[in-house]
Image (cartoon, rainbow, N blue to C red):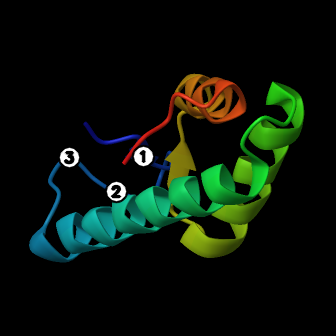
Amino acid sequence: MTRFEFAPGTVGMMIDDEDVARLDAANAVLRATLREVRDELAGQPVGAVHDELVRRLRARVGDGFTVRDADLRADAEAISDGTLFG
């Protein structure tokens, strides 16, 4: 499941191959960032984990994408309680 959406005003009605490639790349960055934050912050408070996920993803993904915050919060909870695997 994709956790990124194109930011408003960046894409028209059709998504071309280049946009799909960018979305795939953004999701690869998301997966790597989740693993990295999990390995560094497992067991830390949910708020701290969420803030770090947001900070790193903003720096790594760039403009043109938004991250679904509800998904990041769920991931932060799973990292905090040690149930995020993969």
78 versus 11 height, above or below: above
Q: Which mark is residue 4?
A: 1
Q: What's the CA distance linking mark 3 and mark 2? A: 7 Å
33 versus 45 height, above or below: below
Please provide percent x and percent y for residue 67.
55, 43
Q: In the structure shown, which secondary structural element does the residue marked by tag 2 occupy? A: loop
Between 77 and 71, the one lying in front of the other is: 77
Q: Nearer the viewer, mark 1 or mark 2?
A: 1
Q: Would residue 62 be seen by someone viewing this image from the given angle?
A: no
Quadrant occupied by the N terminus: top left
Q: Amino acid at mark 1?
A: Phe
Q: Which mark is residue 11?
A: 2
Please provide percent x and percent y for residue 24.
26, 65
Mark 1: few, some, or many residues within 10 Å (few <14, many ≥20)? some
Residue under the point 49% across and 35% down: 84
Please provide percent x and percent y for residue 82.
61, 31
Q: Are marks 3 and 2 in contact (CB under 8 Å)?
A: no
Residue under the point 64% across and 57% down: 39
Q: What's the CA distance linking mark 3 and mark 1? A: 17 Å
Residue under the point 31% across and 62% down: 23
Q: Amino acid at mark 2?
A: Val
19 versus 15 height, above or below: below
Find disc 3 in the rendering and name its residue. 13
Marks 1 and 2, the one that precedes in the sequence: 1
Q: Amino acid at mark 3?
A: Met
Asked if residue 68 lies left or right of residue 86, the reply is: right
Between 66 and 12, the one lying in front of the other is: 66
